[in-house]
Structure formats: structure tokens, C-alpha cells
Amino acid sequence: MSTPQIFSLSEIKAAKEKIAPYVQETPSVHWASPEKDRLFGDTEIWFKMELFQYGGSFKPRGALMVMLSLSEAALSRGVTAVSAGNHAIAVSYAANILGASAKVVMPETSNPIRVQRCQALGAEVILVKDVKIAFEETERLQREEGRTFVHPFEGPLTALGTATVGYEVCHQTPRLDAFIIPVGGGGLAAGMASGIHALWPDCKIYGVEPEGADSMSRSFRSGQPESIESVKSIADSLGAPFALPYSFGLCRAHLEKIVLVDDIRLRSCMSLMFHELKLAVEPAGAASLAALLGPLKEELAGKKVGLIACGSNIDWKKFRELIDHAAPY
């Protein structure tokens, strides 16, 4: 399988300028505290706070790159998307500010607050039984209504959008030795790693997946995009049922390896981030920290490490439910 073309620094800068009117440049924050020292010793840690992005996650960057490339005629016909939440919110947001209509297809199990956020942004939400039916419904909307499908993670425009996250990190922190990025379908990891490596080619990039949603890990092992039968993790926004060629190729080109974390570790790191950083993140937003506290702790000891709080679309009731009985960290 061929590797997708690596983005140039000029391409990433142009993407950042293109979406700049519609997104925030989120901050990177240095974590310094006695608890950090107890857990990690002299490892230095910076968090990229992408949970403060419009829509509550990094997703608007890729959605906007895709939608800003559409002709006026295509935009007037509207867009559609499949998502359990964050991508649906991002497409709803992008459609709202660009004056387009959006029909987003979501599983019935989606968190109600995510459905409500899409509706508040003016999107029509179509709830279906599962992801397979959701994709079938978007195909119908494309065929019958001429809507453009905005993919949640695949394609060069999506990756260019998320590359701007990595570009920002390189201008906000000291030069880092490593960065840990959550992997769902791979759109964030593929793009963000591209952005970091355009400026810091020696920075080691690691991916992290939930044990119950490991399609990219399986793909790395086999050397080709793989799928999983079902998602079995609390990190539903990392629950891509399959990997696809473009994002897989970029991830394979940029990532040192992918590590796995279980739901117990995700819950404890949600609790840690709330108590230490005052952040109420969804499970995916704690995945980078879970990897550093778990499988990558020894490997990255004493290094300068970047993490990303990638999303916060979770209601208080669900958040409390997940952290109330979290294991000690």
C-alpha cells in the first residue's frame, strides 16, 4: 500500500489561514503540581487544550477544510455526516456559520447532549439503530438530495485541518521529545502528526486506542486497513468501526507505534484531569494521559511530552457516573 503524500509546511500554514476565521487557536498548558511530580517525576508535560475549540472538540478543523472547498452550488445543496457526537456537532457548526443546511445521522445510543447541540446549531438530526444503518442513510441523502458527505476522519482535507493542531503546538511549547495522540479513525493522529513533523521531524509521535476499539492497532499489525465487529469502550468518540487507506497510510508514516488503554485507566485519568486541571473531559479526552500513565510511562520518563485534551462533549450526569467509582491513579 502506497503512503499518502506528506504535507509541506506551506500547505499546513495555508490550511491554518483558511480556517482561522472560524476556529480558535487553543492554548497549550504546562502541567506543574506536586501530584504531577508524584506520578511522573521529572517528566515534563504540556496539554493541548483542544476541548476549548468551537463545538467542544478538534473536529471543526477538518470539517471546515472540507466544506470550504465546496462550490457554492454544492454548499447550497447541504451536507450530511455520520457521527456519535463530536463530528456531528462540528459539521452542524460549520454548516451554521457557512449558511448551509446539515442533516447528521447519529446512532440512537448517542449522548443526548450531543444530539441537542447539533439541533441548537440548526442541524436536522436523524437517529438510527447503529452505525451501519447510519452510513446507509447518508448514502440515501447524497443520492436523493445531492448533499455532500463530510467524512469523520478520512481524506487529505480532513488531515490538513487537523495538521493545524500540530502546527499550533510547535509554536506554543518548548521543543517536545514526544507527543501522544488518541486514535479513532485516525484523522486527528494522521493530521496532527503531520503538522508536528513538518516543524519537529525528530519528535516521536505515539497513538493510543481503547482496548475495545482497536481497528488501527489491528491495521498496523496486518499492514492494511482492518475493521472490528463492534466497539466495546466508554470512549465512543474513538469508536471507529474500521480504518481506511488514507488515514492509515499517514498514521503508519508518522507514528512510532500505537498503545492500548482500558476503560479503567480512562476513567481514572478523567478523574485525575478533573481534580488536577479542573477539566471535565469525555473519555477520549483522557486517552493521551492514560497512555502516559500506563503503557508509555517508563519509555517516556524524563522526557518533554505533549498530550491533547481532544474533547469535552459529555453531560454532567454521565461524567459523574464514569468517575464516581474510578480506580485510584
Image (spheres, helix red, strand yellow):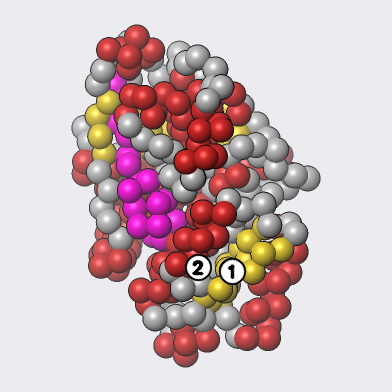
Q: List x then y, in percent, for residue 132.
A: 75, 60
Residue 182 can be seen, yes or no = no
Q: Which residue is mark 1?
A: 125
Find the magenta span and give its range. Answer: 43-62
Q: Residue at x 32, y 40 (%)?
A: 48
Residue 106 is covered by the magenta coloring: no
Dot 1: few (<14), some (14–19), or many (≥20) neighbours within 10 Å?
some
Q: Residue at x 27, y 12 (%)?
A: 34
> Which amino acid type corresponds to the residue marked 1 in the rendered image?
Val
Q: Which residue is mark 2?
A: 119
Q: List x then y, in percent, for residue 77.
A: 52, 86
Corner quadrant of residue 129: bottom right
> Is 48 positioned to the left or the right of 237 in the image?
left
> Is 19 positioned to the left or the right of 326 in the image?
left
Secondary structure beneath disc 2?
A: helix
In front: 268, or 290? 268
Dot 2: few (<14), some (14–19), or many (≥20) neighbours within 10 Å?
some
Q: List x then y, in percent, for residue 53.
A: 34, 53
Q: Do the numbered discs 2 and 1 sit on residues whose CB atoms are within 8 Å?
A: yes
> Is 297 positioned to the left or the right of 235 in the image?
left
In front: 222, or 80? 80
Q: List x then y, in percent, for residue 190.
A: 48, 48
